[in-house]
Amino acid sequence: MGKQLADKRPISSRQAMSIVSSTILGVGVLTLPRVVASEAHEAGWIAILCGAFATSIVMIIVTKLGLRFPHLNFIETCSHVLGRDKGKSNKLGKLLSYPIIIILIAYYLVVAASISRTFGEVVVTAVLKETPLEVIIGTMLLTSLYLVKFDIDVLARLNELLLPLIVIPILLIALLSFQSFQLEFILPVWPGLSLSGFLKGVLLTMFAYQGYELILIFSNRIQIIKKSLWFNILGIIIPSVIYLLIVIAGISVFGDEELAILMWPTLEIIKVTEVPGMILERLESLFLGVWVAAVFTTTANFFYAITLLTQQVFGRGKRIWYGLGFTPIIFWLSLQPQNIIALFDFQQYIGYAGLTLGALIPAFLLIMAFIRKKGSSTGPLATKGPSAKEKSTAIQQE
Amino acid sequence: MKKWKKLLIVVQLLSLVLLSGCWSRRELEERIAVISVGIDAVKENGKKVYKVSIQIPIPVQIAGGGGGGGGGGDAVKVVSAQGETVAKAFSDIQKKLNQVLFMGHTRIIAISEEVAEDGVLDIVDGFRRDPAIRRLLWLLIVEGKAEDLLNSKPKIEQIPTVYIMSLIQNGARTGAIPDVTLGDFFVSISNKSLQPMANRMKLHEDDVYWSGLSLFDHGKMVGNLTDEESWILVQLRDEQPGGHFQVFTGNEENKENIVVSPTQVETKTKLEVKDGKVKAHYHVYMQANILEKNMPEHLDNVKTLAKLRKLAEKHLEHEAEQLINSLQTKQKVDVLRLGSKVKAFHYKEWQKMDWKQAFQDAEITVSYEVQFRRTGMQLN
């Protein structure tokens, strides 16, 4: 792997930011206003802020871990942290890291499945009523499979390219819907919630924020600069701002009681949004058309991470073949929830799992690395020359 | 390598066919666009059932019927069917039509008064679930039969629905008709601090006109407001100017009066909650023009205008008092949105009170401040 790494292009920090943002932005935004309103009521926007804050903290852990082991891929990091020191054979480390990897792969599979299913559901309900769900899920997975064939830098560039396409429409819609803003709906700021109820609301937003942890899998290819951490955090801030706007828009247009019973709240927000001049109406189909890109970047990134991890576990083989193997599994998993309500319940558990896995695994590894004094504690910038330089010389040598 | 290229061409050609996004496409002429829905109650074997009527445009009559104009038949067709539920009636309507019904163009849902009094929650439920139904369409309550509204022939527009729709839309834009859409109705049903209302239509021979508002208590119609009452309501509730009003300047007998047209309204609400009792004061600041004068006194001095101002204020305050009194004692619904204000600004007290009762006990006062800006092209 080490050799391979050197002769491939690194991912720039901006691309890393795009990966984080566009992975987070997916189907979560379609249901988020309802989920938040049903638990945190008028204080939904505070729950979003808290969620963003919590996610940023996890992001710091993830980035620090990546910076500590800049040239190691995830499985190497795991086995290095858990196993014996360098120079000796590290079978123990590998053995210890396998459970982590397997759990992660399983989790990613479930997430990819639930995302493609959710997207399939919304498309079938709102736009393509007679198209079978399986076809929508299938095409989404096959497109993701196609991306798996290419190198990570293709994925990075794709994310960078699609991010504006995802951000601009949703931002416009959120801002336009403020035309029908009603102050009374969003007040009181704190509607007498119990702390546990509010925290549940915050927890539920975690489904919408998941996806940030993928950066861990790609971190060994990311060019390290001084502002790496800042760029990664920015990757979380972008979706947070969108979430914040769309939730405030939802609550201020519908009120929390109405919002809590809307199946696809964001689509309803779009439905009542009038574009000035009344030239365009019924924007929800158009929006879903654009939103394919957002969902694609999420599913594809997860899919890519799955195949990349498997490839690293086996240490050989082409990703596309692993991808081909995983496609039917994800497809099957995505069809498991019997109906949309079961799917939403399922998502809730995924959100909890995501919080646990996304936060606990990197935190555990970072703490272990700290205790066992592995990796460069001061970060790669302070010790040796930045990897970008190294990588460019490596390319020249070739 | 050549083999691969050939395969690639085949794949590309296949994707042209398979991935064109036309899985279940339906051409425009292959479906029937419903533009308005009317719901009535009728008796069938002694049981009360819904009679659902839909208005559908006839494309040939609209597109090709031009030129002479009078030559063709009607531009629309009204189809109806009966059923115990609205959904059942719709499926019966479908049986009468050669193409699939499409609800995405529906602009008006008209419900007869009779149905509205029995409650509309079960009717509304189906419309909420249909993704094609938009929230910005007009829910109208019809005095008489909803079917007659669909059958009305305003003649100015080819399609009656378009006529009624623009009637309401233009009214809503100028502030003369309250801007309450189906979406607002949905929101007011699910929101505990709001109570729904809908615009009311009346038919007289060939004419269709707006006749005020119908008020609902949780899906059941409980009363009406006349057009003038509705205008006062929108002044208090939405800061909309409402319509023209007449102010009597002399005694009752000589009928001297002026006609005033409000142009701009600003409303400030003062809210006080003490021991579960709500005290609210509305102060309405109104800019208005005088449209017509039916009295001998000249309007060319400031003193007269000031006098008229006071009279207008008195008139409006009296009207508003009566409206609030009727809302509190007769209809017993809070369509003033006062509840949501109490919820927003006095949440702790709000949680303790039963708003339906608290609204009836609330002390609501209104004061007006009218300023005449212009008196038209004539000085005196």
Image (cartoon, grey):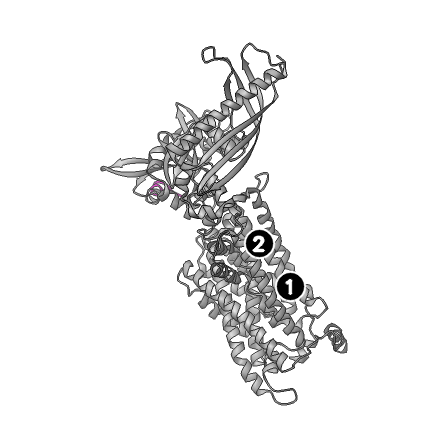
In the shown orientation, is residue A88 left or right of residue B106?
right
Residues beneath discs 2 and 1 located on the same chain: yes
**Magenta segment includes B238:** no
Image coords of residue B27 (percent x, y): 47, 45
Image coords of residue A97 (percent x, y): 55, 80
Mark number for residue A244?
2
In the shown orientation, is residue B212 left or right of residue A23?
left
Question: Which badge, 2 or 1, comes first in the chain's sequence?
Answer: 1
Query: Could you tell me the amino acid type at mark 1?
Result: Ile
Q: Which class describes the residues within 10 Å of circle 1: few (<14), some (14-19), or many (20+)? A: many
Kindly give the residue lying farthest to the bottom in the view shown: A88
Depth check, front residue: A51 or B278: B278
Residue under pointer 1? A233
**Alpha-carbon span between mark 2 and mark 1:** 16 Å
In percent of the image, x 49 and y 29: which residue is there? B232
Query: Could you tell me the amino acid type at mark 2?
Result: Leu
In percent of the image, x 38 and y 46: which residue is there? B126
Badge 2 marks a residue whose secondary structure is helix
Magenta-drawn segment = B92-99
Q: Quadrant of the N terminus of chain B?
A: bottom right
Q: Are marks 2 and 1 in contact (CB under 8 Å)?
A: no
Mark 2 — on which chain does it sit? A
